[in-house]
């Protein structure tokens, strides 16, 4: 562990085998000094002439980004927060001690139905909260193979098909975190992900370390799900609706130019899902927007820099982007064609609930039918 040492131990009271995460000394003092310097640097850049309170062309400020990062970093060195995050993650997925399914999941589908336990394909160490402190985290000892250790995975009998299933499980886990749980780990790098071989010989994804986690509002979660579906269907209208829900458009944004840029990105393939892969996985694709329709939408397109200025970047999405970036690298080590949207799409029915999903699909069908006439 980068912020502490991990030791194997046994609880006297219960005999449970545990991993103890003990924080290194003087971390808080180091954070105080380093973050004070970062705030000064961020303020300097924000005050430069012409900065216009934007980062990478998107409306934001370096000071705000550093302040939001500071909040998460300080939480990371209070192991009571990590314990609470870990417990919430386990409850959201219906995971109990020993890798068993819990009696229920706290997270619900978009229709308000209970989600199934993820214990068949996901595990996380149980946390013994009553013995955790600010600098000591006590968790169930859950050994696993590092998710990117190809040789050990092969030696354990993990096949290429199994690896693709693990990549799907990773995408499925994050689809649920983003769209149902409204709470997610921001740090899915290879060091925090493992593969456990269950008694039946089937591999199961293991997720560790919830020191860095972030929350989304229900409206943001709805927007993320809608933009995923819009990208799959190459639907400009739904993309615009999604951006409104997500709150990423500045007041007074030129919506015609934003719409035109979305259409251009879909037509040129700059933004797309892997439709061949989706078909292989049995995902029912809707008829994508016609090239002629997309070209008509492009009539009002502006320059990239101008269009980017119509967007703002709430801090939550910076952490979503970080999680997606780290996940992509891990996913591709398991499945060379991995992309979050294509691997996660077959589980949209789980996110919405079967009845809600069918209603939406019928609505999409008739919308596409009317557009043709």
Image (cartoon, helix red, strand yellow):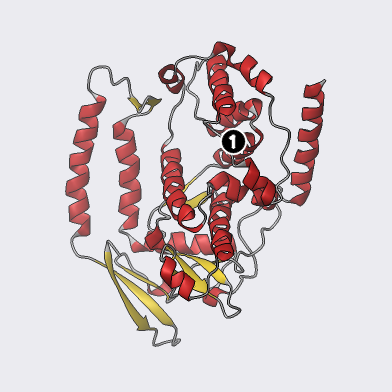
Residue 306, image x and y in percent? 43, 17
Q: Is residue 143 visible?
A: yes
Looking at the picture, does residue 129 appear above or below residue 220? Answer: below
Looking at the picture, does residue 272 appear above or below residue 8? Answer: above
The residue lying at 57 percent from left, 39 percent from top is 224
Q: Quadrant of the N terminus?
A: bottom left
Q: Quadrant of the C terminus?
A: top right
Q: Is residue 127 visible?
A: no
Residue 278, image x and y in percent? 65, 46
Q: Nearer the viewer, residue 318 or 346?
A: 346
Q: Nearer the viewer, residue 181 or 205?
A: 205
**Residue 229 as seen in the image, left or right of residue 151:** right
Within-10-Å neighbours for mark 1: few <14, some 14–19, many 20+: many
- Residue occupying the far top of the picture: 300
Disc 1 element:
helix
Looking at the picture, does residue 291 appear above or below residue 140? Answer: above
**Residue 273 as seen in the image, left or right of residue 83:** right
The residue carrying mark 1 is 227
The residue lying at 51 percent from left, 44 percent from top is 216
The residue lying at 75 percent from left, 39 percent from top is 360
Looking at the picture, does residue 153 appear above or below residue 330? Answer: below
Q: Nearer the viewer, residue 45 or 304?
A: 304
**Residue 24 as seen in the image, left or right of residue 19:** left
Residue 5, image x and y in percent? 27, 70
The residue lying at 56 percent from left, 11 percent from top is 300
Number of callouts in the render?
1
Residue 217, image x and y in percent? 53, 42
**Residue 328 as seen in the image, left or right of residue 118:** left
């Amino acid at each position: 562990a980068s912020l502490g040492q991990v030791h194997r131990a046994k609880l006297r009271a219960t005999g449970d085998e545990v991993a103890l995460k003990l924080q290194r000394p003087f971390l808080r003092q180091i954070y105080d000094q380093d973050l004070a310097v970062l705030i000064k640097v961020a303020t300097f850049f924000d005050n430069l002439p012409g900065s216009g309170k934007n980062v990478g062309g998107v409306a934001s400020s370096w000071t705000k980004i550093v302040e939001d990062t500071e909040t998460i970093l300080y939480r990371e060195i209070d192991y009571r927060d990590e314990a609470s995050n870990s417990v919430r993650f386990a409850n959201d997925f219906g995971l109990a001690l020993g890798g068993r399914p819990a009696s229920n999941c706290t997270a619900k589908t978009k229709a308000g139905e209970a989600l199934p336990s993820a214990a068949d394909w996901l595990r996380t160490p149980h946390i013994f909260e009553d013995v955790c402190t600010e600098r000591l985290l006590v968790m169930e000892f859950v050994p696993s193979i590092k998710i990117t250790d190809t040789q050990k995975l092969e030696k354990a009998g993990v096949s290429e098909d199994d690896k693709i299933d693990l990549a799907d499980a990773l995408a499925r886990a994050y689809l649920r975190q983003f769209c149902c749980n409204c709470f997610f780990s921001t740090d899915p790098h290879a060091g925090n992900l493992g593969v456990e071989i269950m008694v039946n010989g089937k591999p199961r994804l293991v997720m560790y370390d919830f020191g860095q986690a972030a929350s989304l509002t229900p409206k943001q979660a709805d927007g993320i799900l809608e933009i995923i579906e819009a990208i799959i269907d190459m639907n400009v209208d739904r993309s615009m609706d999604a951006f409104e829900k997500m709150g990423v458009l500045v007041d007074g944004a030129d919506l015609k130019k934003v719409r035109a840029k979305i259409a251009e990105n879909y037509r040129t393939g700059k933004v797309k899902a892997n439709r061949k892969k989706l078909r292989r996985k049995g995902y029912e694709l809707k008829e994508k927007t016609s090239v002629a329709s997309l070209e008509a939408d492009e009539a009002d397109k502006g320059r990239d820099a101008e269009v980017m200025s119509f967007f703002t970047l709430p801090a939550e999405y910076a952490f979503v982007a970080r999680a997606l970036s780290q996940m992509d690298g891990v996913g591709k080590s398991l499945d060379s064609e991995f992309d979050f949207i294509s691997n996660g799409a077959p589980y949209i029915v789980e996110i919405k609930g079967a009845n809600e999903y069918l209603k939406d699909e019928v609505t999409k069908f008739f919308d596409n039918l009317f557009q043709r006439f």
